[in-house]
Amino acid sequence: MKIHFIGIGGIGVSSLAQYYLAKGHQVSGSDLAASEITQFLKEKGIKIVIGQFTQNIKPDFDLVIYSPAVPTTNPEYQEAKRLGIKLESYPEALGQLTKEHYTIAVSGSHGKSTTTAMIGLLLEKAGVSPTVIVGTKLKEFGDSNFKMGQSNFLVIEACEYDGSFLNYSPKIAVVTNVDKEHLDYFKTFANVIAEFKKFIMRLPHDGFLVANKDDKHMPKFTKPNFNVTYYSLRQKEAGKLKKLLKIPGQHNISNALAALSVARILQIKDVISFKALSEYQGSWRRFEIKEGQIEEKKITIISDYGHHPTEIMATLKAAREKYPRKKIWCVFQPHQHQRTHYLLKDFVKVFRQAPIDTIIITDIYDVAGRETLAINKTVNSQKLVEKIAKPSITYMPINAAEQFVKENFNTADNILIIMGAGDIYKLVDKF
């Protein structure tokens, strides 16, 4: 088959493209801008075009898969439709695969990528050889977000945005937590909870739900038609995991407990699970510790994807836990005006309570197709910093933040966190 992907640079779409390539199909794709992901795919043999034009769509394509971020007005989408080529969104295409495999789908407002990675690596160590589609790059997968397996097991990250996970048919569903996220789509937290409940109810009668008992917002079921396994930081295994995990933070102990619960359902011995979890090296931009330098002096940098108030606090607490005697700086890029608008009070509360020394907040990263002019005018990083009203927290454009850090950062006893889901990760390369 000849399969073309619109928006192939997306972390989920790029993973699915690699699946079809591994299956022997002829794969091509386009994106609006080049990135390390598009370069990686190109090196793997996928034909990549930067820019989205009607001529990228050929009449002999069998299938065109598009990112949920791609609007129906997109010229490639319109051309595929005009030519009568089969069109599927990324969630629809992945949903079809979940019907053909024994699928473990990991959902939740936070922790999906790490938990998916842990489960995938754990099953691999157990000799199960799963196919894994995850929203982050793993060292164990050769710095890829995909691994082709030999068995019928499929481990996927299941995102709730746009109702994507309602396309999936899992045999095991994991819910790490339910939080006020993606309110630009859901509008209310009640809608978020309702959507997770719909996802959980997609389980078959012989399916399994693995759910975080510590989360007060977890949907409750009086008479479920499936098996429910709860995990909690209060269970005895939490202490053991804290000692053996390479990645810090209570949230990661919780993620590991979720993976352990899945392994037990699949009757994998605990000794294998604990060994696999102890060897997990962490993933791309999830508390990823790197070495940098300022004026030829080495510094420690933590690159982190956190962009929701809950994630930010979890990362900052983990940093303080790991480096109790160091001075910790953070350069944070808010992600999307709408998220900042809807969660403004939560952002203010989190940054006022942040257990670190210096925070610089840069301009908000615009997300194409998910912003509105009205909200863009009501919120910005300067207003956020004014509301926080804490001397150790300042606003700076990203270039000024880079210069400020270079001039004022004490390399001997400081830790630098660079955090956000936008292009802030490029700042890591400047040090």
Image: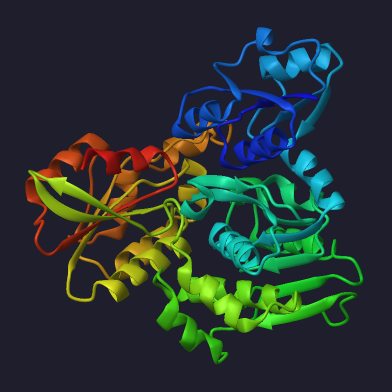
Q: Position of residue 131 (x, y in %)?
A: 69, 52
Relative to 80, is 297 on the left or the right? left
Q: Position of residue 368 (x, y in %)?
A: 53, 31
* Quarter of the view holding residue 207: bottom right
**Residue beneath the point at 74% across and 79% down:** 267
Relative to 405, is 266 on the left or the right? right
Q: Where is residue 33 in the image (x, y as percent from the top left)?
A: 48, 23
**Residue beneath the point at 47% across and 69% down:** 279
**Residue beneath the point at 59% across and 76% down:** 273
* Residue farthest to the bottom, as pictured: 236
Out of 8 and 366, give the one closest to the viewer.
8
Residue 293, relative to residue 120: is it above or below? above
* Quarter of the view holding residue 248: bottom left
**Observer able to see residue 15:** yes
Out of 383 and 67, give the one closest to the viewer.
67
* Quarter of the view holding residue 81: top right
Q: In which quarter of the image is the N terminus?
A: top right
Residue 246, relative to residue 109: is it above or below? below
Residue 413, relative to residue 33: is it above or below? below
Give the total of numbered labels.
0
Q: Where is residue 290 in the image (x, y as percent from the top left)?
A: 29, 53
